Amino acid sequence: MDPKKFKRIALVGATVNPRKYGNVILKDLISKGFEVLPVNPKYDEIEGFKTHKSVEELPKDVDVIVFVVPPEVALKETEKAYKAGFRKFWYQPGAFSREIEEFLNTLNDVEYSAEKCIMVETSSSKGFLNL
């Protein structure tokens, strides 16, 4: 899965709290030109963007669903997303678990990334210096 080819990214765990990764990732991806669809049942809007209350509400043309929530929440949301027809999932560090991996391994039509940071993987350069 090449994250630089994504256009529409759903972010499960987006938040209004600027100190949490759910907000940092949202702003980072938007600044890089991605269309980000925040998913969080607690908010109507985050950073000026309409928030989806659940993965089932997402438009079907989302390229990937990124999870920045605890693993037990990510597992439940992954199951819902799969039932809703989504097949590409990205788990931020700390969002993945053995249970999620076991669930995904029962499916033969999904792509996923575990424990890689979407902010790092979508950066134009992963090094510290551009020489």
Image: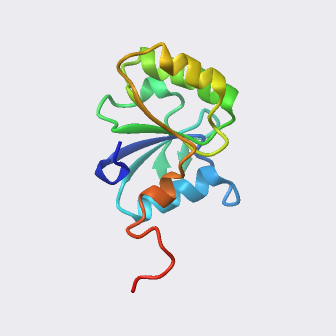
* Vertical order, 36 against 54 (above or below): below
* Left or right position of 55 against 93: left
Q: Residue 55 appears at what percent x and percent y?
A: 48, 27
Would you identify the image quadrant in which residue 4 lies? Answer: bottom left
The residue at 48%/73% (across/down) is 127
Q: Residue 123 appears at what percent x and percent y?
A: 42, 64
The answer to whether one can see residue 102 in this image is yes
Question: Which quadrant of the rendered structure holds the N terminus?
Answer: top left
Colour mapping: rainbow
* Vertical order, 10 against 105 (above or below): below
Judge by depth and name the residue closer to the eye, 126 or 88: 126
The residue at 34%/36% (across/down) is 62
**Total count of labels:** 0
Judge by depth and name the residue closer to the eye, 66 or 61: 66
The residue at 33%/38% (across/down) is 63
Question: Which quadrant of the rendered structure holds the C terminus?
Answer: bottom left
The residue at 46%/67% (across/down) is 126
Q: Residue 11 appears at what percent x and percent y?
A: 50, 42
The answer to whether one can see residue 47 in this image is no
Q: Residue furthest bottom?
A: 131
* Left or right position of 41 against 36: right
* Vertical order, 76 against 10 (above or below): above
